[in-house]
Image: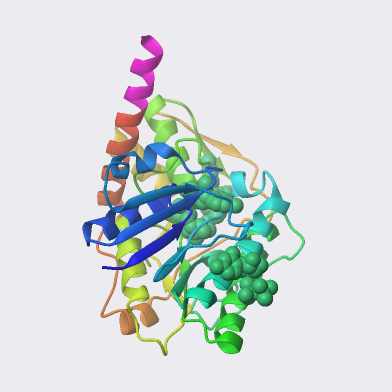
Amino acid sequence: MKRILITGGAGFVGSHLIGRLLEEGHEVICLDNYFTGSKKNILPFMDHPYFELVRHDVTEPYYAEVDEIYNLACPASPVHYQYNPIKTIKTSVMGAINMLGLAKRVKARILQASTSEVYGDPSVHPQPESYWGNVNPLGLRSCYDEGKRCAETLFMDYHNQNHVDVKIIRIFNTYGSNMNPNDGRVVSNFIVQALKGEDITIFGDGTQTRSFQYVDDLVEGMIRMMQTGKEFQGPVNLGNPNEFTMLELATAVLEVTGSSSKLIFKPLPQDDPKQRQPDISLAKEKLNGWEPKIQLREGLEKTVGYFDALLSETASKKAV
Ligand code: NAD
Ligand code: UDP
Ligand code: UDP
């Protein structure tokens, strides 16, 4: 049994990771400032004897005695990370420094939740870890992309200079339950719009692609990465290589929900990547044959079930 710190634990991915680690018998400290996360996501763990919740901002130093750290704190949706770009980059960079300082002091192993955004609008397709990326350092997405790139640099520098035991994963678009209905990312937007009978908002002409991973597959990959030998730092791509256009995604969401919502077209946001697909050969090799098990249709069905229940709950509260 280990004592594990999860920053950003009240968010979408963090809350799933906490569930898995508690199930495995570990003690978990969840640290979050609730910028995009919610107490609702961690409510099921509140009475668990091995769960502890700390309201804290990772841009401030934090002291605890832990064996492992998963550093997830950072808004992940373009709408949220662009709301206060200076805070976003501070969260990635100062958050990484503080958590690496903590890992160094207590000799903890630390995993960084990096992102496929480090590849920017990629000119190499699919993206292997060896690709350096095509990122605009001055655009609307830079606070997130460059913040995450700098965090990766810090992880490798703390490893090389201070021998901190680090792991870096690059997460590709992931979806599932516990996403905030106002999150702003495409899967939650389309599902919520379809369930409410509102128009489905396609940005641009909808031919841009993403590869969508269901959250359980990601959590499995994260835990396997944390267990790899000390000689391996990554980075490792974690994503589902099945690639879809946004038009295909919208069609799948309409089929799964049975909705008759119409598609409407809105301007494409600045620097929106045209394509994205992970090369997962390294993950397969280093993480005991890890590969995603849940494909889009099944994952959408589970996620629609979650949002359906959430929206009914909200509607019945309003009616009271
Ligand atoms: P999320 O927004 O649901 O979760 C992020 C969590 O971090 C929230 O609970 C938020 O309140 C917390 N947080 C933000 N700033 C903080 C701060 N300064 N101090 C403390 N807590 C703070 O997003 P998510 O999808 O769960 O993403 C989790 C991590 O995975 C992020 O680092 C994100 O960049 C990375 N990631 C996610 C995806 C994805 O598709 N879900 C893809 C690539 C990378
Ligand atoms: N830090 C922290 N918790 C700890 C140890 C360090 O938050 O348990 C912070 C510390 O405040 C510092 C940062 O991590 O700002 C980096 O620590 P490091 O030891 O690398 O640098 P230094 O303290 O020498 O600046
Ligand atoms: N997108 C869309 N409609 C929406 C939200 C997003 O068409 O309501 C598009 C967006 O322009 C992008 C893709 O969906 O091309 C994925 O967007 P998301 O914000 O989920 O993730 P990211 O761009 O960071 O991969």
In this rendering, the answer to whether 266 lies above or below 210 is: above
The image shows residue 268 at horizontal and vertical percentages of: 64, 47
What scheme was used to colour the molecule? rainbow
Q: Is residue 255 left or right of residue 194?
A: left
Q: Quadrant of residue 196?
A: top left
Q: Is residue 317 magenta?
A: yes
Residue at x 63%, y 59% (from the top left corner): 144
Evaluate whether residue 193 shows in this view: yes
Residue 68 colored in magenta in the image: no
Position in image of residue 128 (x %, y %): 48, 79
In the rendered structure, the answer to whether residue 96 lies left or right of residue 233 reads right
Query: On the picture, is 12 further left or further right than 183?
Result: left
Relative image position of residue 211 (x, y in whole percent):
42, 60
Residue at position x 31%, y 59% from top? 27
Residue 208: x percent and y percent? 53, 56
Along the line of sight, which residue is nearer the eye, 198 or 145?
A: 145
For the N terminus, which image quadrant?
bottom left
- The answer to whether one can see residue 209 in this image is no
Residue name at image x 27 percent, y 37 percent: 305
The residue sitting at the right extreme is 138
The part of the chain drawn in magenta is 311-320
Q: In the rendered view of the protein, which quadrant contains the C terminus? A: top left
Q: Is residue 85 left or right of residue 209?
A: right
Q: Quadrant of residue 93?
A: bottom right
Magenta stretch, main secondary structure class: helix
56 vs 197: above or below: below
Front residue (pair 170, 55): 55
Q: Please determine whether, in this image, residue 202 is positioned above or below residue 158.
A: above
